[in-house]
Image: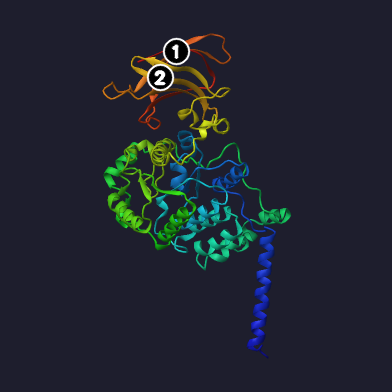
Amino acid sequence: MTHDSPFKFGLRAMAVAAVVVAGVLVSDGIWLFQAPLNNNPHVEKRWEALRKLHHDSIPLDVLIVGNSHSYTGINPKHLSAELGANAFVLANNGTNWADSEWMIREALNYCSPKVIVLETYGCDHSEPGMEGKTHFVDQVRAYRARNEGRIHWKSAWDLFSYDELPAALSPTLLNHHYTWTDPERVNSNFRRKRAIDGPDLEGLFLGRFVRFTTGLTDSLLTKYVDDGAPVDGNELTMSEANLTAGDAIAELCAERGIELVLLSLPMYKEHVAHMAEWTSRREVAWAERMPGVEHLNLQELSDLADEPAYFENTYGGNQHMTLTGSIAATGCLAQNLMQRYDSILPSRDKTAAWHELFEGEEGYYAFQTPQNGDATASTWARQATFESYQIQDILSFPTNKGKVVAIQLRMAQPDAGEPAPPKQLRTQWLFRVNGDSAVQRALIPLEIAPHLTRDDVVRYRHFIKPDITLLKLEGVGR
């Protein structure tokens, strides 16, 4: 029995390796092992939407970057409506600052924001190769949603360990198990021989993704009392990889003339023990590494953290905001941006094109006045006086995709020394139920909406069924 010389064995090994590599390249080239589009492709939708805005020459003024805390905690349509500008949330679940750096670098190919808001929860302990399967899958998904060649290639070496790189770069290596777990998908991919179509964009999408609409329950609030906080701030750390990414983001923003704001969205006040110590450690590190960059800490600078309705009903480590909470947090961010950057943020709400883009969208009527020709909202009163209260307007408009109709009253905050605005106002209406010719009369109470109320304007709301047609506003009273 003869044996190959080391030289021949090396040649054979190289030939086999070449065949394997060629096979993987061909398989990747015809998309043989591509994964199906996620059931909720909001990560992919953000990039599709960002590119579409660029294609349609719609500029972005404020870009919010981060992880799931960002897309559940900031509502970009509400932010746009309150600022009278264009805001967008670019975020991926489970991502960190290292990934946010590359998101920003690629996003700047499609937009030139005046302000970038970087959510701070992504400045954590994570490092490439250290976070386990779930984090790796989230990171791969975020990585593949981007597609700019040079940045895409460079970012892979920063975001994945050497062990992870092959699977991150090659769908074949990542998903070859489809051969025995889902052969029909492989056959379908082979017949298609191209990438699966991206997600459909319905209407104006600015990155919002709502997961939670109800807040903390009494039973969970009791658990906080009985068991204490589920998270210990003294155990939370920041990796050098994420701090270095923060340095790079700050330098990039300075080079491009972009204002950078660090934003800490809140969790419920009892959710994290030693919150002050955790905040202090982070702020010391950021002040040293990113001098001059403002940190807007909504955990401390507002009463958001006191309100159970604003937070996901979970005792787990990662708590997000509800829809109502996100709107309240968005208002805090909007007020801060207007105070600090009013001179550089454009007043796009002075243009008809901006109103055409946002008319009828979520949050629009909370902060904007219906324009001439607006077919979505009905105006029932404008610049009226009730007792000593100055009512700006009373509107009705469909919301929640037409499932309900909102009745909204806006009035100026009373001056110092005047009575505080009541918690409830009653409005009297003539109305008709659709399909019934009889005209009826009813008192409809409007409740103050604290998540929409600001220092200058109080907002009241009530929601009615869409089969009720309002005919006439007869009066406003207590």
* Type of amino acid at the residue the image marks with label 2: Ile
Q: Position of residue 238 (x, y in %)?
A: 37, 59
Q: Residues within 10 Å of mark 1 (few under 14, many from 20)?
A: few
Disc 2 versus disc 1: nearer the observer: 2
Q: Earlier in the sequence, mark 2 or mark 1?
A: 2
**Closer to us: 173 or 123:** 123
Q: Which mark is residue 245?
A: none
- Label tally: 2
Q: Dot 2, how many residues are within 10 Å of its Cα: few (below 14), some (14-19), or many (20+)?
A: many
Q: What x and y, as percent, mark residue 255?
A: 48, 55
Identify the mark at residue 442; answer none if there is no mark. Answer: 1
- Label 1: state its secondary structure: strand
Place of residue 90 in the rendered image (x, y in percent of width and height, measured from the top left): 51, 47
Helix or strand or loop: what does disc 2 sit on? strand
Residue indicated by mark 2: 391
Q: Nearer the viewer, residue 215 or 376?
A: 376
Q: Residue at x 48, y 32 (%)?
A: 363
In this rendered view, identify the residue nearer to me: 95 or 138: 95
Quadrant placement of the N terminus: bottom right
Judged from this view, the residue extending furthest toward the right is 191
Above or below for 405 versus 234? above
